[in-house]
Image: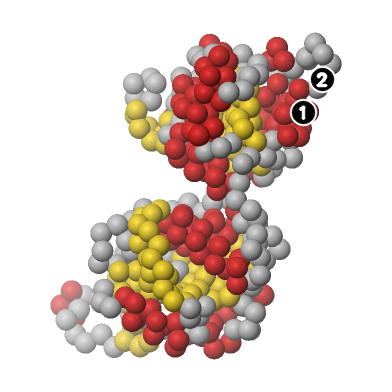
């Protein structure tokens, strides 16, 4: 497995780092723990040594008596470095490249991927200085996880909790995945479209864009250059993804058509409206007139268009949101739209489809069918990216 540097800074949440270290060791990783002086006020090196089976380091080790350069050795041996918890103070220092201790020096010296898991009071997390530090770290290629919401050390509730050890372990597992799509271009659609009837009413669906974001993030973490064409969504787009915001199906179709030729893979997760009003009323339609017939017309079938113009070497993945015979409908869509993979969703099933954190899918290809889930949408995204990588000859 991998060798991980786990940095621990001074916060009440430091006790969770002991559980995280134990969890990582149980997964087969070698864990080198590095504590800041403030962290030692909350937890001890002995606690980490007990759960990792390896010595834990402190600032006293920065200059070893035997002459070895500890920060260079730990930085060079690491496959990944994670700081959990990362205090506001440490984020600010790391953003400015300060090296006033062993942990900060390791982060400057390592070429491994670096993750930081913040933990602090809500007001500190929201402060402009902290936001600037986080933005700088992300611009430098560091991954800053989002803190969780809930009960804080002050007794208040809000955003600022350290994510649970299992969540951090999952983020580490994702970061350690092989970057099989380096140099590849992946185009993703996500979210709903809105087809306006008048300035205040539209036809749409319950899609939030969560599945498209999960796929885009998984492709980014695999090394791809990712463009996400995103319909109306309130969800934040992770850094490192080019996003094209659209509203209507016609705008989404135009954005895809302009970028499709240069894409190695197209993953169409968006819930695109099939119909739109033939004309958009320039002013709000009066309630009494809403019962009148509303002339509709079909929107562009983006996936069918892509299937009709694709190059043989391009990979094409579509989604099928169904409430009936999922396998039959997914198979029909696979054939009619010339896809390599159709991800079928029974949107009437609990925990699957629209507006959920999880999904349960049927992967349908020319070679057969495979059930995926129930699991997180991120893990479904990783399964899709693995399929794309295989089809592109990048095992």
**How far, Cα to Cα, is label 2 from label 1?**
8 Å
* Residue at the (54%, 51%) spot, across then down: 238
Label 2 close to label 1 by CB (< 8 Å):
yes
Q: Image height check: is 247 above or below 123?
A: below
Nearest to the observer: residue 280 or residue 146? 146
What is the crowding at mark 1: few (fewer than 14 residues within 10 Å), some, or many (at least 20)? few
Q: Is residue 290 visible?
A: yes
Q: Earlier in the sequence, mark 2 or mark 1?
A: 2
* Residue at the (41%, 73%) spot, across then down: 369
Residue 277 at what x, y percent from top left?
Answer: 33, 83
* Residue at the (34%, 81%) spot, across then down: 329
Q: Is residue 131 visible?
A: no
Residue 63 at what x, y percent from top left?
Answer: 78, 15
Residue position marked by numbered label 2 in the rendering: 68
Residue 29 at what x, y percent from top left?
Answer: 59, 36
Hey, which quadrant is residue 349 in on the image?
Answer: bottom left
Nearest to the observer: residue 293 or residue 103? 103
Residue 73 at what x, y percent from top left?
Answer: 77, 28
44 on left or right of 123: right
Q: Image height check: is 222 above or below 260?
A: above
Task: Determine whether the residue tagged by mark 1 lies in a helix, strand or loop.
Answer: helix
On the rendered image, what quadrant is the N terminus found in?
Answer: top right
275 on left or right of 244: left
Task: Determine whether the residue tagged by mark 2 lies in a helix, strand or loop.
Answer: loop
Residue position marked by numbered label 1 in the rendering: 73
Q: How many marks?
A: 2
What is the crowding at mark 2: few (fewer than 14 residues within 10 Å), some, or many (at least 20)? few
On the rendered image, what quadrant is the C terminus found in?
Answer: bottom right
């Amino acid at each position: 497995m991998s060798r991980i540097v786990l940095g621990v800074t001074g916060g009440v949440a430091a006790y969770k780092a002991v559980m995280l270290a134990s969890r990582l060791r149980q997964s087969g990783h070698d864990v080198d723990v590095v504590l800041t002086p403030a962290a030692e006020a909350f937890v001890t090196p002995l606690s980490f040594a007990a759960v990792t089976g390896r010595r834990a380091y402190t600032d006293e080790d920065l200059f070893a008596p035997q002459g070895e350069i500890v920060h260079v050795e730990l930085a060079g041996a690491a496959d990944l470095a994670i700081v959990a918890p990362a205090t506001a103070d440490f984020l600010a220092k790391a953003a400015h490249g300060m090296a006033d201790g062993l942990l900060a020096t390791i982060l400057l010296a390592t070429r491994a991927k670096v993750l930081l898991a913040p933990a602090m009071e809500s007001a500190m997390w929201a402060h402009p200085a902290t936001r600037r530090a986080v933005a700088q770290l992300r611009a430098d290629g560091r991954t800053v996880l989002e803190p969780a919401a809930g009960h804080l050390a002050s007794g208040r509730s809000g955003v600022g909790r350290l994510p649970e050890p299992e969540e951090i372990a999952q983020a580490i597992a994702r970061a350690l995945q092989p970057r099989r799509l380096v140099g590849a271009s992946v185009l993703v659609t996500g979210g709903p479209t809105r087809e306006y009837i008048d300035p205040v009413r539209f036809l749409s669906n319950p899609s939030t864009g969560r599945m498209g974001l999960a796929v885009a993030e998984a492709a980014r973490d695999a090394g791809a250059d990712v463009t996400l064409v995103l319909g109306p969504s309130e969800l934040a787009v992770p850094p490192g993804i080019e996003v094209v915001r659209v509203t209507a199906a016609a705008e989404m179709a135009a954005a895809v058509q302009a970028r499709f030729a240069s894409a190695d893979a197209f993953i169409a997760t968006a819930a695109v409206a099939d119909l739109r009003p033939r004309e958009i009323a320039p002013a709000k339609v009066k309630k009494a007139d809403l019962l009148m017939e509303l002339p509709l017309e079909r929107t562009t079938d983006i996936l069918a268009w892509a299937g009709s113009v694709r190059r043989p070497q391009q990979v094409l993945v579509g989604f099928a949101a169904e409430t009936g015979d999922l396998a039959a409908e997914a198979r029909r869509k696979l054939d009619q739209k010339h896809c390599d993979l159709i991800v079928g969703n029974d949107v009437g099933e609990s925990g699957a489809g629209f507006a959920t954190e999880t999904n349960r899918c049927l992967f349908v290809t020319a070679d057969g069918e495979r059930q995926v889930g129930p699991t997180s949408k991120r893990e479904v995204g990783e399964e899709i990216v693995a399929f794309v990588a295989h089809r592109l000859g990048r095992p």
